[in-house]
Amino acid sequence: MKLNDTGVALDVRVKQAKQLGRDNNPKAIDLLLQGLDSRDEVLRAAIIASLKAQNGDLVLLLRAADAKRPSAERVAALGGIRALKPPKAGLKLAALLDDKDAGVREAAAHALCVVGTAEAEARLVQGLNTEASSQVRYFIAVALGELKTPAAKQAVAAQLKSETDFVVKDALEQATTKQARP
């Protein structure tokens, strides 16, 4: 059974998610990740608790960094990291901003919007200037908007002057607004 199968009663899916948290099968984490896109808060909470019970933060960080894994698995692992918000993940996520796969870089930047932003500040500032992908720059701009340091503010202001992508420019403007708030 898939956790995001809305044809199955919610209480059954929540029970399944909780059972997966106690399952020693390595595929349990994969099944939990597949259900993370659920919009039901009770189910998401059960999935996140089960991922934590499975030491998901460690497993998922290792998966995300493993360049031998398929891109889709690495991106899914980064989605799990975004949901788990493990402390001290910033430097590991920042390292993924140099990955050769744009999807992995994008997912890493997206995760840095909610976890490890301060730890990754130097790499985010650098990436804002050097990243070719506008999707990745978008999430870097969002992440930098969470920081009110002089370096983050300066990077956002400088990129705003030269950015040509409309969506990234909008994210930079929003970052400037957030950074200006007390």
Image (spheres, helix red, strand yellow):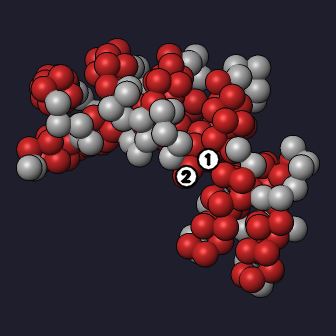
Looking at the picture, how far across and down is residue 112, in whole percent?
43, 37
Looking at the picture, how far across and down is residue 64, in whole percent?
65, 30
Above or below 68: residue 55: below
Looking at the picture, how far across and down is residue 108, in whole percent?
51, 33
Above or below 38: residue 9: below
Indicate left or right for 13 with 26 as reference.
left
Quadrant in the rendering for residue 65: top right
Indicate left or right for 180 with 36 as reference.
left
Tell me if mark 2 has few (under 14), some (14-19) or many (20+) residues whose alpha carbon lies within 10 angstroms of its own.
Answer: many
Q: Amino acid at mark 2?
A: Ala
Above or below 36: residue 82: above
* SS at circle 1: helix
**Numbered badge on residue 24:** none
User: Which residue is depicted at the point 76% across and 26% down?
Assistant: 69
Cβ–Cβ under 8 Å for marks 2 and 1: yes
Quadrant that contains the N terminus: bottom right
* SS at circle 2: helix
In the displayed image of the protein, which residue is found farthest to the right? 25
Q: Amino acid at mark 1?
A: Gly
Q: Nearer the viewer, residue 47 or 167?
A: 47
Tell me if mark 1 has few (under 14), some (14-19) or many (20+) residues whose alpha carbon lies within 10 angstroms of its own.
Answer: many
The residue that mark 2 highlights is 83
User: Which residue is depicted at the point 41% across and 45% down?
Assistant: 114
Quadrant in the rendering for residue 149: top left
Q: Nearer the viewer, residue 45 or 4?
A: 45
Q: Nearer the viewer, residue 167 or 103?
A: 103
Q: Is residue 135 visible to the viewer in this orientation of the structure?
A: no
User: Which residue is depicted at the point 61% across and 75% down?
Assistant: 42
